[in-house]
Each structure stands twice: as C-alpha cells, then as structure tokens.
Amino acid sequence: MDQTVLEKQMAELDRSEVKREFTGLLHYVVYAIAVLFMGFHLYTAYFGILGGMQQRIVHLGFVLVLTFLISPATRKSRRDRVAWYDLILVGLALASIWYVFKEDEELSFRVGITFQQDIVFGIIMVALILEANRRLSGLALPLITLGFIAYAFLGPYLPGVFYHVGFDVPRVVTIIYLTMDGIWGVPLYVSATYIVLFVLLAAFLHKSGAGQFFTDIAYGAFGRVRGGPAKVAIVASGFFGSFSGSAVANVVGTGTFTIPLMKRVGFRPQFAGAVEAVASTGGQFMPPIMASVAFVIAEIVGISYWDVAVAAAIPAFLYYLALFCMIDLEAAREGLKGVSGEDLPSVRKNFLRNGYLLIPIILLIYVLGVLQMTPMKAGLVTIAATLVVAMVRKEHRLNLQRFVEGLYNGATGTLMVGAACANIGIIVGVLMLTGFGYKLSNMLLELSGGNLFLLLLLTAIASLILGMGVPTLAAYLVLAIFVAPALENIGVPVLAGHLFIFYFGIISAITPPVALAAYAGAGLAGSDPWKTGWEASRLGLVAFILPFMFVYNPVMLMMGEPLEVLWATITGGIGVWTLAAALQGYVFGKLSILQRLVLLGVALMLIKPGLLTDGAGMILLSAIMGQHWYTTKKQKGIVGTASVQTGGSWEN
C-alpha cells in the first residue's frame, strides 16, 4: 500500500478521536446534557422503557446533540468552543427528533400517507446521522450507507441481480424515517436499552478503580516472566476490550501503558504495536460482554444472551492462548526477560486490599447466567453494585465529581455505538425495500455451488471487506443482514454462522489494508503502520482458522457432550501452541522450514475437533518435538565442546 494512503488512514483515525474540551458555562452545559442522557436510561431501566419508538427516538436525540457539541467537524476546528454551524445541526437534530416523537402515535393510522414535512425532516435526519458517524468513526460507514441510498433510486438502471423497480423519495423516506424497519429498528433498540447500560457500567468500573486493580494484578502475575509486559497487555486488553465497543479505542486506552513497557524489555516496536492491536481486537469477542454484541446476536438469533456467551468462550480462550504462546516463543527466541520483581505490584497484597472490586463483575455473570435476568436489569443491578462496592474504601469512593464524570464518560462512550446503530437502520431500510440482502445470499450460494468450504471462504472475504473501518457492532449488523442468510440456507447452525461472520468482521481491524487497530498500535509504538499491520495479522492468524473449525464441528461452541467439549478444548489448546511454534519458528531452538510446515499441518489437525485428526496430530507432534529436542541438544553439545577446546565457555 502507498505510504500516503496509510497516512490518510492514520489521519482519519486520529481525527475521529478528537474531542472538544470546554471551560466555563459550556463545560457545565455539556455535562448536564450527558447526566440527563444517562439519567433517562437509568430511570427507564428501572421503571420501564417508553412505548412505541419513543425510547429509541429520545436515545438518538441525545446521541446527535452530544455528538455535534463535543465532536468537531474537522481536526482544525476550535476545541474550546462550539462552531455556529454545529449549533445549527443541534437545532435541526432537536427539530427532526421532536417531529417524529410527536408523530409516533399517529403513524399507525396513516400508513401509506406521506406528508411534505415527513420528507423534509426525514432527509434532515439521514444527513445528521451520516455526519455524526463521519465525526465519530470516519468515512467508511457513511460512504457505504450513501451507496445503499443511491441503490434505492438507481435499481431500474442496474443489471442482473442488482436490478429492482426503483423507488421515489417519499417511499424511501417513509421506510427509513417513519417505521421500525429503518432507523428505529432492532439495532437502535438494542443500543437504547442494553448497550448504553453496559457502556455506563464500564465507565463506573473504571472510575471505581476496578480497571486499575485488574491491570495491577495482571502486571504482578506476568510482569516478571519472559515477555511479561506483552502478556500483561493480553490480560488487560482482553478485560477492557470485552466492555469496549471499539478495538481502536481499546488500543489507545491500554496501549499507552503496555506498549512502552514492551519496548522497554526489548520487543521490536512493530511487534509491541501488533500485540496490543491483536489483544484489543480479541476483547471484542471475549465473554462475558463481547463489546455488547452478544446481546444483539441473542436478539437476532432468538436465543438467550447466556447461550451466546457460553458458545463464544472456547474460541476466545484459544485465541488468547495462541497470542500468549506467540509472545512467549518470541521472547524465548530473542532472549528477552521480564521486569524486575521490585518494580512489580504484589498480587497477594492487591487481592487482599482491593479484591472486592471484582464483586460487580462476578455478580454480573451470576445474574445473567444463573438467574437468567434480562440484560437491561442485569446491567442496572451491576451498576448499583459497583456504586455500593466503591464506597468501601476512600480512594475508590465515587464522590459527586467522580460520579458525574462516570455519567459523562458513559454518555460519550455511547455516542459511536448509538450513531452506528442508527446508520445501520438506514441500510436495513433500503434492504427491506429492495430485497438486496436476499439476492446477495443467493449470489453467494450460486458462486459457491453449494460447497460449504467455498461458501465459508467467500463469506469470510466478504466479512473482512465489509467490516473494514467499521465499529464492531456496526460491522456485525451489516454482515448479519448481508451474508448470514447464505450460511443458514446451506445448513450451518444459526449461532455458528453468526459467530463466524462476527469473528471475521472484527479481525478486519488487524487485516491490511485497513487494519485500523494495528495502525493505532503503530502510532503509539512509533513503528511503520504497514509492517505493524502484517505483524498483527500473523499474530492473530488463529482467528482466521477458528471460525472454520467451529462451523465444521460446533462442539467448540459447547454444542456437545461435556467430555467432547473438554477434549476439544485440550487438543485445541495444544493445536494453537503448535501453530505458534510453526509461525515463530522456535521452540527449544530454531526450527527448520520443513519442521515448521509439518507443525502447521499438525496445528490444523489438532484445532479441528475429531478423534482421528487429534490422534494423528498428537503422534506427528510427538515425533517432531522429540526429533527437534534431540537435534537442538546435540547442536548445543557440539558448540560447547568446540568452545572448551578454544578456551571459550559453554554459554557460547
């Protein structure tokens, strides 16, 4: 890729992270709006959500108003004041929100009747949503959406499967703006009921010190072992990434701490940036929260949230185990050590002093998994528990200032997800109108000729392309509309199919040419973005393999007998270690090209569940490792003898 293209992508990434910093009256106004935003959601979570589309309308209204107040239009915009044109956008947002809120109860009585005001406010709303997404997450999603809007009008002029009869402006606006098939559909409903509460929970956990406690525990446990800081990055980023809706935001949040540590103990800058990118990306499919997408999958598939989280557990474990092994072998090959023991926090003392901060997370898992509480009620209960637990020690106590800051962080953390969900609603409306989603599924089936592997390969490629540069939740929703039906039509279990596209949509963040998480890591590490992107793809290779494996054998998704699941986990763990060895080219010493190729095949055999492949893989692995161990020891012995004869040392 041309360096100028990389620079443009990095500039867009940096611009999307810019936030205004107000002082004086504006500071208090923005904080007041954020507090009202979160207060509305806490109130409706306890007393019941508003009927019809009103809960979603109010939610989006807050999202748009806050976005135009705190996210400047360009990098060069003033950060200490609101531009006049942003105030106009705020006014237009309030007007279009008020109009549809007022008309909500009447819409069912005038189906098929469109007024001029509907068209005007509908066009304004679509334009505002596109602009909000441009400011919050870049151009990718707005450009895709504009393409679909154009498709709604240009259908009669397109060939083959792309043809449709075409629709006029009133018809398109009605679907997108005035029905639950468009902006106000399932994606925005999930954002306005479930996701907002878990974003707020993450903000309060951070303010209460739970995040720092978890990082200190990881640092104390792994900091002293070889490659320790990189292993700390895995644990910390996996924890924070599960709550985060953005791999890029997670890289920026935890990478400022982990990447300098990795570089300090000797890891190459591009390797350090890639480790953080891969670890942060994996957090998006790490239970229990899975970046809140677990709730959306459950809603679409029609199963409980807990079923989704349980199914995702083994693949997530194997993903992080593979990364852990890659880091360990890299450190062994380069002779890297951990951090000095006196520089590390004590795990025991931290647990004794601050272990109670984990109570809200344990409670969350209990109320969701055992009590089967709804996600909205579970989020509310866990938020309350976090506030109570934070009162135990003075340094963690949420006084009024920290409480308000938590509400503000929750509100601003919701903006990207809420805007993306509204944007996806526009795409859904066009698909409902034109039937293109059904056509695309049929096209994938025809191209694959009914062959499952070829269909999975085409689906993976489509998922990587459609997920590039798009926030996690938005990427999944686009893919659920476009490609999931094709997998279902060929007989793939519904949950396995949705997790398949979810994985590939997420790992587009570490897949060049638009590997935004890797580019963010490169920025923090001071390394070349292009090289860091390819390094991240290599470190995260297991994520390209696991989805194929769990589609072919859903036992990896806990769909089988307990012993089958346990055996699949054990052999899968050995398999990802073998994959790491093959990719790193090092175990006891340097591996030959032939040994690496054989180990790569063995890894695939072990990762794929099945007694035949597991048995053959274990035999081959034992043979290769035995031979490698023997030859390495023999070579070291020869070198040692030669050193003695020349007056050298056995350490040469």
Image (tube, grey):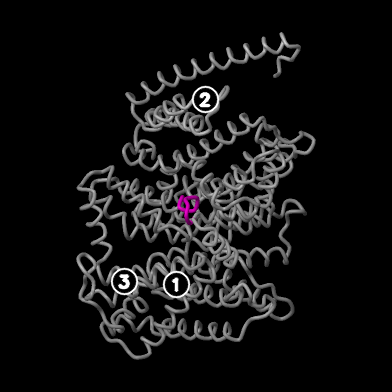
In which quadrant of the rendered view does residue 76 lie? Answer: bottom right
Look at label 1 and name its amino acid: Arg
Label 1: which residue?
Answer: 56
Viewer-nearest residue: 194 or 212: 212
Question: Closer to the camera: disc 3 or disc 2?
Answer: 2
| Residue at the image point whose x is 47% and y is 45% from the top | 370
Magenta stretch, residue numbers: 507-514
| Residue at the image point whose x is 41% and y is 73% from the top | 51
Look at label 3 and name its amino acid: Val
Question: Closer to the camera: disc 3 or disc 1?
Answer: 3
Q: Point out residue 494 in the picture as x, y percentages from the top left corner.
A: 31, 49
Q: Point out residue 531 in the picture as x, y percentages from the top left corner.
A: 55, 48
Look at label 2 and name its amino acid: Leu
Q: Is residue 84 above or below residue 604?
A: below
Q: Point out residue 490 in the picture as x, y percentages from the top left corner.
A: 23, 48
| Residue 366 seen by the camera | no
Q: Residues within 10 Å of mark 1 (few under 14, many from 20)?
A: many
Sooner in the amino-acid sequence: mark 2 or mark 1? 1
| Residue 194 seen by the camera | yes
Element at label 3: helix
